[in-house]
Image (spheres, rainbow, N blue to C red):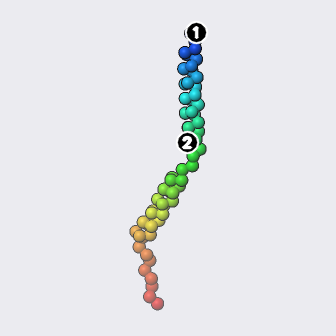
Amino acid sequence: MNPAEPYLALHHLRAADLRAEADAHRLAATAKRPTPDLRTRVGWTLVEVGLRLASVPPKQQLA
């Protein structure tokens, strides 16, 4: 038995693990997440509604 064989087997296992982690990272980086966009739109809508509620409407003149 070659003394380097156990190290070579461990090397192959570790390389396969690293490849799998890299693939998972690549997939996670390219996945589109709609939540931040939705959160931003809802947030600005709430700000707009709050500003409309807080502002005093101008008084209408009687003719």
**Residue 35 % position (x, y):** 50, 53
* Residue highlighted by disc 2: 28
Q: Residue, x 58% and y 17% (percent of image)?
A: 8
Q: Residue, x 42% and y 66% (percent of image)?
A: 50
Residue 30 or residue 51, whichever sits in front: 30
Seen in the picture, residue 15 relative to 48 is either above or below; the reply is: above
Q: Residue, x 57% and y 46% (percent of image)?
A: 31
* Residue highlighted by disc 1: 1
Residue 45 or residue 54, whichever sits in front: 45
**Residue 22 % position (x, y):** 57, 34
Seen in the picture, residue 18 relative to 10 is either above or below; the reply is: below
Q: Amino acid at mark 1?
A: Met
**Residue 34 % position (x, y):** 54, 53
Label 2: few (<14), some (14–19) or many (≥20) C-alpha neighbours in 10 Å = few
- The number of discs equals 2
Q: Residue, x 58% and y 12% (percent of image)?
A: 4
Residue 63 or residue 22, whichever sits in front: 22
Quadrant into which the N terminus falls: top right
Local SS, label 2: helix
Seen in the picture, residue 13 relative to 20 is either above or below; the reply is: above
**Residue 61 % position (x, y):** 45, 85
Do callouts 2 and 1 mark residues in contact (Cβ within 8 Å)?
no
Residue 28 or residue 41, whichever sits in front: 28
How far is disc 2 from disc 1 in space, using C-alphas?
A: 42 Å
Local SS, label 1: loop
Rendered image quadrant of residue 27: top right
Seen in the picture, residue 39 relative to 58 is either above or below; the reply is: above
Q: Amino acid at mark 2?
A: Ala
